[in-house]
Amino acid sequence: MRSLRLLSCGMVAAILTAASAVAQSSSAPETADAADRFTNRDLMEHSQRDRRIWLAAFIGGAANAVALHDVEAGRCISRWYDEDDLEQLGLIERSMSAYPDNRPVEIIFALVRRECPSFIPES
């Protein structure tokens, strides 16, 4: 069971990395290093509407990927965002503004982990 959970975490990380790459493709990086790093600052430069769409797709995709191997953890992620998406959007945006050089996946993982502790098991 532990290996399934680790596999699902790996799958989610891959999905989230791919989502970051897609979002990044809309901005032209200045250096090769910048091309590898879609940051919170990059996402916050988009309109609130675009951020909301990106986050809903990102979180929904993560919830579905996790649910393939842990239905309850997937449901927890969905509930966390869907029950009050405007409140969560505000929390996510405040967190991203506080850590502009971090990646969106880091903020989302931290916030989801706080609400859904079984999402990523302790090592």
Image (cartoon, rainbow, N blue to C red):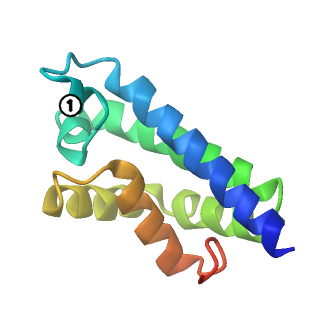
Give residue 97's position: percent from left, percent from top: 16, 56
Q: Nearer the viewer, residue 66 or 8?
A: 8
Give residue 68's position: percent from left, percent from top: 82, 53
Tell me: 47 left or right of 66: left
Q: Amino acid at mark 1?
A: Ala
Residue drawn 47% across and 63% down?
A: 109
Tell me: 86 left or right of 15: left
Give the quarter of the image for residue 83: bottom right
Give the quarter of the image for residue 90: bottom left
Residue drawn 18% across and 60% down?
A: 99
* In the image, residue 74 above or below residue 111: above
Residue drawn 52% across and 43% down?
A: 16
**Residue 3 visible, this orientation:** yes
* In the image, residue 111 above or below residue 65: below
Tell me: 31 left or right of 72: left
Q: Nearer the viewer, residue 104 or 37?
A: 37
Residue drawn 63% across and 43% down?
A: 61
**Residue 46 visible, this orientation:** no
Mark 1, other Cα within 10 Å: few <14 / some 14–19 / many ≥20: few
Mark 1 residue element:
helix
Give the quarter of the image for residue 107: bottom left
- Return the residue at label 1: 34
Give residue 19's position: percent from left, percent from top: 49, 34
